[in-house]
Image (cartoon, grey):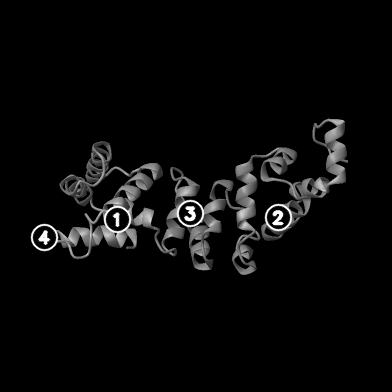
Amino acid sequence: MIRYDKGPEEIEEAEGRGIQELIDSWKSPMIPFDRYVRRVSAAFFKSRLRLEAAAYWLSTTSAELAGLLQLATLDDESLSLMSDRIPPKTTWFALAEGDIDGIKAALLSLGQKRPNELSRDVVETAIRRYVEPSSEDKVGKLDGSVVKYMSSKAKHYGSLNPNARHALFKFGGLMDKGHKLTAKQVAFMLDLLNQMVDDGAIRRDSPDKDQEMCDAVLDALGR
């Protein structure tokens, strides 16, 4: 019987839709972890529940369940690396993005993690060494002086509105000072730089004696 504190109608629904199997798989032993992941994933898709509804029945969060389901997308060889060791839940999404070499490096890094380091950061750093950097990663690592220059160039070409140019200049200043931009800021900066490319302000044949900086931006954007 379902043991969670649900109403009679909910319990009847669960028993009639195979949710009990999902709950049983969730509560089953987590070692070997690779088999646990496969078991929960199979039960989840068999239940045909939406993620939020399944998380409700399991008395967990949608993020935790989604992280486990992401791990289930790994091939058997990669997932088996975690068979006898359950990685921290905060690392599941990052591990799911790695190839087998990245996962090996991430698990090794977790074993050597210092007390003041976050498990998620350790895994993401290890995975990134084996994953092709995204445009967001590359743009976030541009030299701040290049970003600030592009703000001035946007004005010269009539590209971007004043608020957007100010934001670009501000981002460059933060980067110059060694600050790491947030994901939202990087995404916004990427959009602004792409718009400048579309407007012809940044191009491979720049007439403004700034080809090196233009190429750096275009390489980061993958254009």
Q: Is residue 179 visible to us here?
A: yes
- Pointer 2 local density, CA inside 10 Å: few below 14, some 14–19, many at least 20: many
Residue occupying image coordinates x 59% and y 47%? 89
Q: Where does residue 74 sit, x and y in percent of width and height?
A: 60, 63
- The kind of secondary structure element at disc 3 is helix
Comes first in the chain, label 3 or label 1: 3
Query: Marks 1 and 4, how far apart in space?
Result: 19 Å
Q: Say which quadrant the N terminus sits in.
A: top right
Marks 1 and 4: CB-CB under 8 Å? no
Cα–Cα span, label 4 and label 3 = 41 Å
Q: Quadrant of residue 176?
A: top left
Kind of element beneath mark 1: helix
Instruction: Specify whether 4 is left or right of 142.
Output: right
Residue 198 badge: 1
Disc on the earlier residue, 2 or 1: 2
Q: Is residue 112 visible?
A: no
Please rate how many residues cluster around mark 4, counting C-alpha atoms within 10 Å: few if below 14, some from 14 to 19, many from 20: few
**Does label 2 or label 4 sit earlier along the sequence?**
2
Disc 4 marks which residue? 209
For marks 3 and 1, give the CA distance: 36 Å
Q: Nearer the viewer, residue 185 or 157?
A: 157
- Mark 1 or mark 4, earlier in chain: 1
Locate residue 105, reporting x and y percent: 48, 62
Q: Which residue is mark 3?
A: 123
Q: Amino acid at mark 2?
A: Ser
User: Label 2: which residue?
Assistant: 41
Asked if the residue under mark 2 is in contact with the one under mark 3, i.e. CB atoms within 8 Å, the reply is: no
Viewer-nearest of discs 4 and 3: 4
- Quick check: 134 left or right of 214? right
How far across and how far down the image is residue 188, in percent?
35, 44
